[in-house]
Amino acid sequence: MNLLLISNSTMAGEEYLLWPRKHIENFLRQHNLSEVCFVPFAGISLSSKSMKDSYDVYAERVGAVFHSLGAKLVSVHTTNDPVQRVKDAQAVVVGGGNTFHLVYQLQTLGLMDVIREKVKSGTPYIGWSAGSNIACPSLMTTNDMPIIEPLSFQTLGLIPFQMNPHYLDANPAGHGGETRQQRIEEFLIVNQKTKVAGLREGCLLWMQEEQFKIIGSKPLRVFEYNKEPYEIEPGSDVSFLLE
Amino acid sequence: MNLLLISNSTMAGEEYLLWPRKHIENFLRQHNLSEVCFVPFAGISLSSKSMKDSYDVYAERVGAVFHSLGAKLVSVHTTNDPVQRVKDAQAVVVGGGNTFHLVYQLQTLGLMDVIREKVKSGTPYIGWSAGSNIACPSLMTTNDMPIIEPLSFQTLGLIPFQMNPHYLDANPAGHGGETRQQRIEEFLIVNQKTKVAGLREGCLLWMQEEQFKIIGSKPLRVFEYNKEPYEIEPGSDVSFLLE
Protein backbone atom coordinates (compact mmCIF):
# COMPACT_ATOMS: atom_id res chain seq x y z
CA MET A 1 0.00 0.00 0.00
CA ASN A 2 0.94 3.62 -0.52
CA LEU A 3 -0.01 5.83 2.40
CA LEU A 4 0.88 9.32 3.52
CA LEU A 5 -0.60 9.73 7.01
CA ILE A 6 -0.06 13.24 8.30
CA SER A 7 -0.66 14.36 11.90
CA ASN A 8 -1.87 17.91 11.25
CA SER A 9 -2.42 20.12 8.22
CA THR A 10 -0.91 23.27 9.65
CA MET A 11 1.43 24.40 12.42
CA ALA A 12 -0.08 27.12 14.64
CA GLY A 13 0.40 30.51 12.96
CA GLU A 14 1.60 29.12 9.63
CA GLU A 15 0.09 29.15 6.16
CA TYR A 16 -2.43 26.36 5.42
CA LEU A 17 -0.85 22.96 4.67
CA LEU A 18 2.58 24.58 4.62
CA TRP A 19 4.74 22.20 6.63
CA PRO A 20 3.72 18.94 4.87
CA ARG A 21 3.77 20.49 1.39
CA LYS A 22 7.17 19.16 0.34
CA HIS A 23 6.21 15.67 1.51
CA ILE A 24 2.93 15.79 -0.39
CA GLU A 25 4.80 17.00 -3.49
CA ASN A 26 7.28 14.17 -3.14
CA PHE A 27 4.47 11.62 -2.70
CA LEU A 28 2.60 12.96 -5.75
CA ARG A 29 5.78 12.73 -7.83
CA GLN A 30 6.71 9.23 -6.60
CA HIS A 31 3.31 7.98 -7.72
CA ASN A 32 3.04 10.07 -10.89
CA LEU A 33 -0.24 11.64 -9.78
CA SER A 34 -1.81 14.36 -11.93
CA GLU A 35 -5.22 14.32 -10.22
CA VAL A 36 -6.53 13.43 -6.77
CA CYS A 37 -10.01 12.76 -5.42
CA PHE A 38 -10.69 14.79 -2.26
CA VAL A 39 -13.01 13.83 0.62
CA PRO A 40 -14.08 17.03 2.47
CA PHE A 41 -16.68 15.55 4.88
CA ALA A 42 -14.71 16.23 8.08
CA GLY A 43 -14.68 19.95 7.33
CA ILE A 44 -18.08 21.20 8.37
CA SER A 45 -17.29 24.65 9.76
CA LEU A 46 -15.35 26.37 6.97
CA SER A 47 -18.43 28.35 5.98
CA SER A 48 -21.35 29.52 8.10
CA LYS A 49 -23.68 29.42 5.08
CA SER A 50 -24.24 25.69 4.68
CA MET A 51 -22.54 22.32 4.88
CA LYS A 52 -22.31 22.24 1.07
CA ASP A 53 -20.64 25.64 1.10
CA SER A 54 -18.20 24.47 3.77
CA TYR A 55 -17.20 21.54 1.54
CA ASP A 56 -16.82 23.94 -1.43
CA VAL A 57 -14.54 26.23 0.56
CA TYR A 58 -12.54 23.27 1.87
CA ALA A 59 -12.06 21.72 -1.59
CA GLU A 60 -11.01 25.07 -3.02
CA ARG A 61 -8.50 25.67 -0.24
CA VAL A 62 -6.90 22.23 -0.52
CA GLY A 63 -7.22 22.32 -4.31
CA ALA A 64 -5.12 25.48 -4.49
CA VAL A 65 -2.29 23.77 -2.63
CA PHE A 66 -2.45 20.63 -4.79
CA HIS A 67 -2.63 22.78 -7.92
CA SER A 68 0.57 24.54 -6.85
CA LEU A 69 2.14 21.07 -6.58
CA GLY A 70 1.05 20.13 -10.09
CA ALA A 71 -2.07 18.05 -9.38
CA LYS A 72 -5.71 18.73 -10.12
CA LEU A 73 -8.17 18.12 -7.27
CA VAL A 74 -11.76 16.94 -7.71
CA SER A 75 -13.97 16.60 -4.66
CA VAL A 76 -16.38 13.69 -4.01
CA HIS A 77 -19.07 16.11 -2.85
CA THR A 78 -19.59 17.69 -6.29
CA THR A 79 -21.03 14.62 -8.01
CA ASN A 80 -24.23 12.62 -7.66
CA ASP A 81 -22.21 9.44 -7.86
CA PRO A 82 -19.42 9.71 -5.28
CA VAL A 83 -18.82 5.95 -5.36
CA GLN A 84 -17.96 6.12 -9.07
CA ARG A 85 -15.77 9.16 -8.52
CA VAL A 86 -13.74 7.26 -5.92
CA LYS A 87 -13.55 4.23 -8.20
CA ASP A 88 -12.15 6.41 -11.00
CA ALA A 89 -9.62 8.18 -8.76
CA GLN A 90 -5.84 8.11 -9.24
CA ALA A 91 -5.46 8.81 -5.51
CA VAL A 92 -7.68 9.51 -2.50
CA VAL A 93 -7.05 12.52 -0.23
CA VAL A 94 -8.98 12.82 3.04
CA GLY A 95 -8.78 16.11 4.94
CA GLY A 96 -9.07 16.76 8.67
CA GLY A 97 -11.90 18.15 10.75
CA ASN A 98 -14.39 16.16 12.78
CA THR A 99 -13.72 12.40 12.61
CA PHE A 100 -17.24 11.38 13.70
CA HIS A 101 -18.83 13.43 10.93
CA LEU A 102 -16.37 12.12 8.35
CA VAL A 103 -17.06 8.52 9.34
CA TYR A 104 -20.83 9.03 9.36
CA GLN A 105 -20.76 10.47 5.84
CA LEU A 106 -18.44 7.81 4.43
CA GLN A 107 -20.64 5.07 5.90
CA THR A 108 -23.99 6.48 4.80
CA LEU A 109 -22.71 7.23 1.28
CA GLY A 110 -21.25 3.72 0.96
CA LEU A 111 -17.74 5.09 0.50
CA MET A 112 -15.95 3.37 3.37
CA ASP A 113 -15.83 -0.04 1.67
CA VAL A 114 -15.00 1.42 -1.75
CA ILE A 115 -12.06 3.46 -0.44
CA ARG A 116 -10.76 0.52 1.62
CA GLU A 117 -10.81 -1.85 -1.34
CA LYS A 118 -9.25 0.67 -3.69
CA VAL A 119 -6.40 1.67 -1.39
CA LYS A 120 -5.70 -1.94 -0.44
CA SER A 121 -5.31 -2.61 -4.18
CA GLY A 122 -2.56 0.01 -4.40
CA THR A 123 -4.24 3.38 -5.02
CA PRO A 124 -2.25 6.03 -3.11
CA TYR A 125 -3.92 7.54 -0.03
CA ILE A 126 -3.15 10.85 1.67
CA GLY A 127 -4.83 11.83 4.93
CA TRP A 128 -4.27 14.33 7.70
CA SER A 129 -5.73 14.47 11.19
CA ALA A 130 -9.21 12.85 10.85
CA GLY A 131 -8.05 11.55 7.46
CA SER A 132 -5.18 9.72 9.16
CA ASN A 133 -7.39 8.48 11.98
CA ILE A 134 -9.72 6.63 9.61
CA ALA A 135 -6.81 4.68 8.12
CA CYS A 136 -6.85 2.77 11.44
CA PRO A 137 -9.17 -0.14 12.31
CA SER A 138 -11.58 2.19 14.12
CA LEU A 139 -12.21 5.84 14.91
CA MET A 140 -11.15 5.20 18.49
CA THR A 141 -8.19 7.30 19.71
CA THR A 142 -9.45 10.33 17.80
CA ASN A 143 -9.28 13.59 19.75
CA ASP A 144 -12.51 14.83 18.24
CA MET A 145 -15.81 15.50 19.91
CA PRO A 146 -18.66 13.10 19.12
CA ILE A 147 -21.07 15.47 17.36
CA ILE A 148 -22.97 12.83 15.38
CA GLU A 149 -23.47 9.10 15.88
CA PRO A 150 -21.84 7.03 13.12
CA LEU A 151 -23.27 3.66 12.07
CA SER A 152 -20.31 2.00 13.75
CA PHE A 153 -16.81 2.89 14.92
CA GLN A 154 -15.21 0.73 12.21
CA THR A 155 -13.15 2.66 9.67
CA LEU A 156 -10.79 1.81 6.78
CA GLY A 157 -8.44 -0.55 8.61
CA LEU A 158 -5.56 0.07 6.20
CA ILE A 159 -3.14 -0.35 9.10
CA PRO A 160 -3.61 -2.70 12.08
CA PHE A 161 -2.75 -0.16 14.81
CA GLN A 162 -4.41 3.02 16.04
CA MET A 163 -2.99 6.50 15.56
CA ASN A 164 -3.45 9.54 17.74
CA PRO A 165 -2.81 12.58 15.53
CA HIS A 166 -1.94 15.96 17.15
CA TYR A 167 -0.33 13.95 19.95
CA LEU A 168 0.32 16.34 22.81
CA ASP A 169 2.54 15.76 25.83
CA ALA A 170 1.02 18.04 28.44
CA ASN A 171 -2.24 19.58 29.50
CA PRO A 172 -2.73 23.34 29.70
CA ALA A 173 -1.40 24.52 33.09
CA GLY A 174 -3.88 24.15 35.96
CA HIS A 175 -6.34 21.98 34.02
CA GLY A 176 -7.60 18.87 35.81
CA GLY A 177 -8.71 16.80 32.77
CA GLU A 178 -6.91 13.68 31.59
CA THR A 179 -3.65 14.04 29.67
CA ARG A 180 -3.46 12.51 26.20
CA GLN A 181 -1.24 9.74 27.57
CA GLN A 182 -3.83 8.87 30.23
CA ARG A 183 -6.56 8.72 27.59
CA ILE A 184 -4.51 6.37 25.42
CA GLU A 185 -3.66 4.21 28.41
CA GLU A 186 -7.39 3.88 29.10
CA PHE A 187 -7.89 2.79 25.49
CA LEU A 188 -5.24 0.09 26.03
CA ILE A 189 -6.97 -1.26 29.13
CA VAL A 190 -10.03 -2.03 27.00
CA ASN A 191 -8.07 -2.93 23.82
CA GLN A 192 -5.02 -4.75 25.14
CA LYS A 193 -3.78 -6.14 21.84
CA THR A 194 -3.75 -2.90 19.86
CA LYS A 195 -0.73 -0.59 19.58
CA VAL A 196 -1.26 3.16 19.53
CA ALA A 197 1.08 5.56 17.71
CA GLY A 198 1.04 9.10 19.10
CA LEU A 199 1.94 11.26 16.09
CA ARG A 200 3.02 14.72 17.22
CA GLU A 201 2.30 17.82 15.13
CA GLY A 202 4.79 18.28 12.30
CA CYS A 203 5.12 14.51 11.74
CA LEU A 204 3.82 11.90 9.32
CA LEU A 205 3.97 8.20 8.50
CA TRP A 206 5.05 7.29 4.97
CA MET A 207 4.27 3.86 3.54
CA GLN A 208 5.44 2.90 0.07
CA GLU A 209 5.42 -0.74 -0.93
CA GLU A 210 7.82 -2.43 1.53
CA GLN A 211 8.85 0.80 3.25
CA PHE A 212 7.15 2.30 6.31
CA LYS A 213 8.72 5.15 8.23
CA ILE A 214 8.18 8.10 10.54
CA ILE A 215 9.16 11.48 9.11
CA GLY A 216 9.11 14.86 10.82
CA SER A 217 10.51 17.08 13.50
CA LYS A 218 9.70 14.95 16.57
CA PRO A 219 9.80 11.30 17.61
CA LEU A 220 6.78 9.01 17.42
CA ARG A 221 5.49 7.94 20.85
CA VAL A 222 4.28 4.34 20.87
CA PHE A 223 1.94 2.89 23.47
CA GLU A 224 1.36 -0.77 24.21
CA TYR A 225 -0.62 -2.36 27.03
CA ASN A 226 1.40 -2.89 30.21
CA LYS A 227 4.58 -1.40 28.72
CA GLU A 228 6.31 1.93 29.26
CA PRO A 229 5.57 4.17 26.25
CA TYR A 230 8.62 4.49 24.00
CA GLU A 231 9.91 6.93 21.38
CA ILE A 232 10.92 6.24 17.77
CA GLU A 233 13.19 8.82 16.16
CA PRO A 234 12.15 10.55 12.91
CA GLY A 235 13.58 8.76 9.86
CA SER A 236 13.23 5.33 11.51
CA ASP A 237 11.50 2.32 10.04
CA VAL A 238 8.22 1.59 11.86
CA SER A 239 7.26 -1.70 10.17
CA PHE A 240 7.00 -3.33 13.61
CA LEU A 241 3.69 -1.45 13.98
CA LEU A 242 2.27 -3.64 11.21
CA GLU A 243 2.87 -6.90 13.10
CA MET B 1 -35.97 16.40 39.73
CA ASN B 2 -33.04 16.72 42.10
CA LEU B 3 -29.71 16.96 40.35
CA LEU B 4 -26.21 17.96 41.34
CA LEU B 5 -24.19 18.12 38.10
CA ILE B 6 -20.55 18.88 38.82
CA SER B 7 -17.97 19.81 36.18
CA ASN B 8 -14.90 18.16 37.74
CA SER B 9 -14.13 16.18 40.87
CA THR B 10 -10.89 17.88 41.73
CA MET B 11 -8.99 21.11 40.99
CA ALA B 12 -5.42 20.49 39.79
CA GLY B 13 -3.14 19.94 42.79
CA GLU B 14 -5.95 19.69 45.36
CA GLU B 15 -7.20 16.81 47.50
CA TYR B 16 -9.70 14.46 45.79
CA LEU B 17 -13.27 15.83 45.59
CA LEU B 18 -12.25 18.76 47.78
CA TRP B 19 -13.83 21.76 46.07
CA PRO B 20 -17.36 20.33 45.61
CA ARG B 21 -17.44 18.75 49.10
CA LYS B 22 -19.49 21.45 50.79
CA HIS B 23 -22.02 21.36 47.94
CA ILE B 24 -22.32 17.59 48.12
CA GLU B 25 -22.76 17.82 51.90
CA ASN B 26 -25.46 20.44 51.43
CA PHE B 27 -27.22 18.31 48.80
CA LEU B 28 -27.09 15.20 51.02
CA ARG B 29 -28.56 17.18 53.92
CA GLN B 30 -31.29 18.83 51.82
CA HIS B 31 -32.46 15.39 50.73
CA ASN B 32 -31.88 13.61 54.05
CA LEU B 33 -29.63 11.03 52.47
CA SER B 34 -27.90 8.46 54.68
CA GLU B 35 -26.79 6.14 51.86
CA VAL B 36 -25.96 6.55 48.17
CA CYS B 37 -25.55 4.06 45.33
CA PHE B 38 -22.32 4.63 43.40
CA VAL B 39 -21.67 3.89 39.72
CA PRO B 40 -17.89 3.47 39.17
CA PHE B 41 -17.88 2.31 35.50
CA ALA B 42 -16.16 5.40 34.10
CA GLY B 43 -13.14 4.82 36.32
CA ILE B 44 -11.17 2.11 34.59
CA SER B 45 -7.58 3.14 35.32
CA LEU B 46 -7.45 3.53 39.10
CA SER B 47 -5.71 0.19 39.44
CA SER B 48 -3.40 -1.61 37.04
CA LYS B 49 -4.47 -5.02 38.40
CA SER B 50 -7.92 -5.39 36.88
CA MET B 51 -11.08 -3.50 35.99
CA LYS B 52 -12.78 -4.95 39.07
CA ASP B 53 -9.92 -3.71 41.23
CA SER B 54 -10.15 -0.27 39.63
CA TYR B 55 -13.84 -0.10 40.55
CA ASP B 56 -12.99 -1.23 44.11
CA VAL B 57 -10.37 1.49 44.49
CA TYR B 58 -12.73 4.10 43.02
CA ALA B 59 -15.64 3.15 45.28
CA GLU B 60 -13.38 3.19 48.33
CA ARG B 61 -11.96 6.60 47.44
CA VAL B 62 -15.37 8.20 46.86
CA GLY B 63 -16.85 6.25 49.76
CA ALA B 64 -14.35 7.80 52.19
CA VAL B 65 -15.46 11.29 51.14
CA PHE B 66 -19.15 10.47 51.44
CA HIS B 67 -18.54 8.78 54.79
CA SER B 68 -16.89 11.97 56.05
CA LEU B 69 -20.08 13.79 55.02
CA GLY B 70 -22.29 11.36 56.94
CA ALA B 71 -23.46 9.04 54.14
CA LYS B 72 -22.72 5.40 53.47
CA LEU B 73 -21.76 4.47 49.90
CA VAL B 74 -22.56 1.16 48.21
CA SER B 75 -21.30 0.52 44.69
CA VAL B 76 -23.33 -1.12 41.91
CA HIS B 77 -20.35 -3.22 40.90
CA THR B 78 -20.31 -5.32 44.11
CA THR B 79 -23.62 -7.09 43.55
CA ASN B 80 -24.86 -9.66 41.06
CA ASP B 81 -28.06 -7.67 40.68
CA PRO B 82 -27.06 -4.07 39.93
CA VAL B 83 -30.55 -3.27 38.61
CA GLN B 84 -32.08 -4.13 42.00
CA ARG B 85 -29.38 -2.15 43.80
CA VAL B 86 -30.24 0.94 41.78
CA LYS B 87 -33.95 0.38 42.37
CA ASP B 88 -33.35 0.23 46.12
CA ALA B 89 -31.14 3.33 46.19
CA GLN B 90 -31.87 6.53 48.13
CA ALA B 91 -29.70 8.41 45.63
CA VAL B 92 -27.54 7.66 42.58
CA VAL B 93 -23.95 8.96 42.34
CA VAL B 94 -22.05 8.64 39.04
CA GLY B 95 -18.33 9.37 39.05
CA GLY B 96 -16.14 10.68 36.23
CA GLY B 97 -13.64 8.93 33.98
CA ASN B 98 -14.28 7.72 30.45
CA THR B 99 -17.80 8.56 29.24
CA PHE B 100 -17.82 5.95 26.46
CA HIS B 101 -16.96 3.16 28.87
CA LEU B 102 -19.52 4.36 31.40
CA VAL B 103 -22.26 4.46 28.76
CA TYR B 104 -21.32 1.04 27.37
CA GLN B 105 -21.53 -0.55 30.83
CA LEU B 106 -24.80 1.15 31.78
CA GLN B 107 -26.35 0.03 28.50
CA THR B 108 -25.15 -3.57 28.57
CA LEU B 109 -26.13 -4.01 32.24
CA GLY B 110 -29.59 -2.55 31.59
CA LEU B 111 -28.99 0.28 34.04
CA MET B 112 -29.55 3.29 31.76
CA ASP B 113 -33.34 2.92 31.70
CA VAL B 114 -33.57 2.07 35.40
CA ILE B 115 -31.56 5.11 36.50
CA ARG B 116 -33.48 7.40 34.13
CA GLU B 117 -36.86 6.28 35.42
CA LYS B 118 -35.79 6.46 39.05
CA VAL B 119 -34.25 9.93 38.87
CA LYS B 120 -37.19 11.27 36.85
CA SER B 121 -39.42 10.03 39.70
CA GLY B 122 -37.48 12.21 42.16
CA THR B 123 -34.52 10.15 43.40
CA PRO B 124 -31.57 12.55 43.88
CA TYR B 125 -28.71 12.26 41.37
CA ILE B 126 -25.13 13.42 41.77
CA GLY B 127 -22.66 13.26 38.88
CA TRP B 128 -19.33 14.75 38.00
CA SER B 129 -17.52 14.94 34.65
CA ALA B 130 -18.71 11.80 32.74
CA GLY B 131 -21.45 11.49 35.39
CA SER B 132 -22.72 14.95 34.44
CA ASN B 133 -22.37 14.27 30.74
CA ILE B 134 -24.75 11.31 30.83
CA ALA B 135 -27.49 13.43 32.41
CA CYS B 136 -27.80 14.99 28.91
CA PRO B 137 -29.75 13.52 25.98
CA SER B 138 -26.59 11.95 24.53
CA LEU B 139 -22.91 11.44 25.21
CA MET B 140 -22.08 13.98 22.51
CA THR B 141 -20.08 17.01 23.72
CA THR B 142 -18.00 14.79 26.01
CA ASN B 143 -14.27 15.54 25.95
CA ASP B 144 -13.40 11.89 26.34
CA MET B 145 -11.67 9.60 23.91
CA PRO B 146 -13.80 6.89 22.28
CA ILE B 147 -12.14 3.76 23.70
CA ILE B 148 -15.11 1.42 23.32
CA GLU B 149 -18.18 1.49 21.09
CA PRO B 150 -21.41 1.93 23.08
CA LEU B 151 -24.70 0.43 21.85
CA SER B 152 -25.86 3.96 21.05
CA PHE B 153 -24.98 7.55 21.98
CA GLN B 154 -28.26 7.98 23.89
CA THR B 155 -27.87 8.58 27.62
CA LEU B 156 -30.15 9.50 30.55
CA GLY B 157 -31.79 12.60 29.07
CA LEU B 158 -32.58 14.08 32.47
CA ILE B 159 -32.05 17.54 31.00
CA PRO B 160 -32.84 18.61 27.41
CA PHE B 161 -29.52 20.36 26.70
CA GLN B 162 -25.92 19.14 26.39
CA MET B 163 -23.19 19.93 28.88
CA ASN B 164 -19.49 20.22 28.26
CA PRO B 165 -17.77 19.59 31.60
CA HIS B 166 -14.16 20.80 32.15
CA TYR B 167 -14.98 23.62 29.73
CA LEU B 168 -11.72 25.25 28.76
CA ASP B 169 -11.23 28.62 27.07
CA ALA B 170 -7.89 28.19 25.34
CA ASN B 171 -5.66 25.58 23.78
CA PRO B 172 -2.15 24.93 25.04
CA ALA B 173 0.19 27.48 23.44
CA GLY B 174 1.39 26.54 19.96
CA HIS B 175 -1.10 23.67 19.50
CA GLY B 176 -2.96 23.57 16.20
CA GLY B 177 -5.96 21.44 17.22
CA GLU B 178 -9.50 22.80 17.57
CA THR B 179 -10.38 24.85 20.65
CA ARG B 180 -13.25 23.64 22.82
CA GLN B 181 -15.42 26.45 21.46
CA GLN B 182 -14.75 25.35 17.86
CA ARG B 183 -15.68 21.77 18.76
CA ILE B 184 -18.95 22.86 20.33
CA GLU B 185 -19.74 25.09 17.36
CA GLU B 186 -19.27 22.06 15.11
CA PHE B 187 -21.72 20.13 17.30
CA LEU B 188 -24.24 22.96 16.82
CA ILE B 189 -23.92 22.86 13.04
CA VAL B 190 -25.15 19.26 13.10
CA ASN B 191 -27.54 19.71 16.07
CA GLN B 192 -28.98 23.16 15.54
CA LYS B 193 -31.80 22.98 18.09
CA THR B 194 -29.71 21.87 21.07
CA LYS B 195 -28.14 24.27 23.57
CA VAL B 196 -24.71 23.47 25.00
CA ALA B 197 -23.63 24.59 28.47
CA GLY B 198 -19.86 24.89 28.89
CA LEU B 199 -19.30 24.20 32.60
CA ARG B 200 -15.85 25.39 33.66
CA GLU B 201 -13.86 23.59 36.36
CA GLY B 202 -14.95 24.56 39.87
CA CYS B 203 -18.60 24.92 38.83
CA LEU B 204 -21.81 22.89 39.07
CA LEU B 205 -25.49 22.98 38.20
CA TRP B 206 -27.93 22.49 41.07
CA MET B 207 -31.53 21.45 40.40
CA GLN B 208 -34.01 21.08 43.25
CA GLU B 209 -37.71 20.93 42.47
CA GLU B 210 -38.46 24.29 40.80
CA GLN B 211 -34.96 25.70 41.25
CA PHE B 212 -32.12 25.37 38.73
CA LYS B 213 -28.95 27.40 39.08
CA ILE B 214 -25.25 27.66 38.31
CA ILE B 215 -22.95 27.64 41.33
CA GLY B 216 -19.19 28.07 41.38
CA SER B 217 -16.24 30.31 40.82
CA LYS B 218 -16.74 31.08 37.11
CA PRO B 219 -19.60 31.90 34.75
CA LEU B 220 -21.35 29.31 32.62
CA ARG B 221 -20.71 29.69 28.87
CA VAL B 222 -23.80 28.94 26.79
CA PHE B 223 -23.70 28.08 23.10
CA GLU B 224 -26.60 28.17 20.67
CA TYR B 225 -26.58 27.75 16.92
CA ASN B 226 -25.96 30.99 15.03
CA LYS B 227 -25.64 33.08 18.20
CA GLU B 228 -22.65 34.60 19.95
CA PRO B 229 -21.83 32.44 23.00
CA TYR B 230 -22.87 34.18 26.22
CA GLU B 231 -21.94 33.99 29.90
CA ILE B 232 -24.20 33.40 32.90
CA GLU B 233 -22.84 34.54 36.26
CA PRO B 234 -22.56 32.06 39.16
CA GLY B 235 -25.61 32.15 41.41
CA SER B 236 -27.95 32.84 38.48
CA ASP B 237 -31.05 30.90 37.60
CA VAL B 238 -30.56 28.79 34.46
CA SER B 239 -34.10 27.46 33.97
CA PHE B 240 -34.09 28.84 30.41
CA LEU B 241 -31.83 25.89 29.54
CA LEU B 242 -34.79 23.58 30.19
CA GLU B 243 -37.01 25.20 27.53
Image (tube, coloured by chain):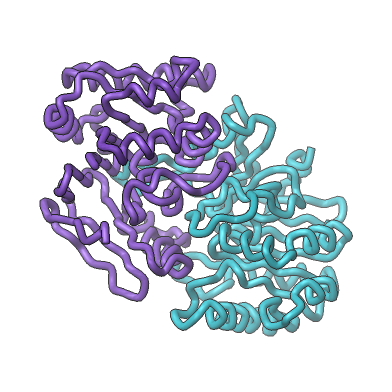
Chain colours: A purple, B cyan
Q: Is residue A22 left or right of residue A173?
A: left
Q: Nearer the viewer, residue B81 or A87?
A: A87
Q: Nearer the viewer, residue B174 or B114?
A: B114
Is residue A197 at all visible to an observer of this figure?
Answer: yes
The C terminus of chain A sits in image quarter: bottom left
Is residue B73 at all visible to an observer of this figure?
Answer: no
The N terminus of chain A sits in image quarter: top left
Q: Is residue A188 left or right of residue B211?
A: left
Tell me residue A228's x, y (percent): 28, 73
Tell me residue B191's x, y (percent): 63, 33
Up/down of A104 relative to A87, above or below:
below
Residue visible at 18% across and 52% down in the picture: A218
- Quadrant for residue A78, please give it: top left
Up/down of B212 relative to A19, above or below:
below
Residue visible at 48% across and 43% down in the picture: B180
Up/down of A36 relative to A140, above or below:
above
Tell me residue B60's x, y (percent): 61, 83
- Quadrant for residue A131, please give it: top left
Q: Is residue A143 left or right of residue B96?
A: left
Tell me residue A82's x, y (percent): 45, 22
- Quadrant for residue A4, please give it: top left
Residue visible at 88% across and 59% down in the picture: B121
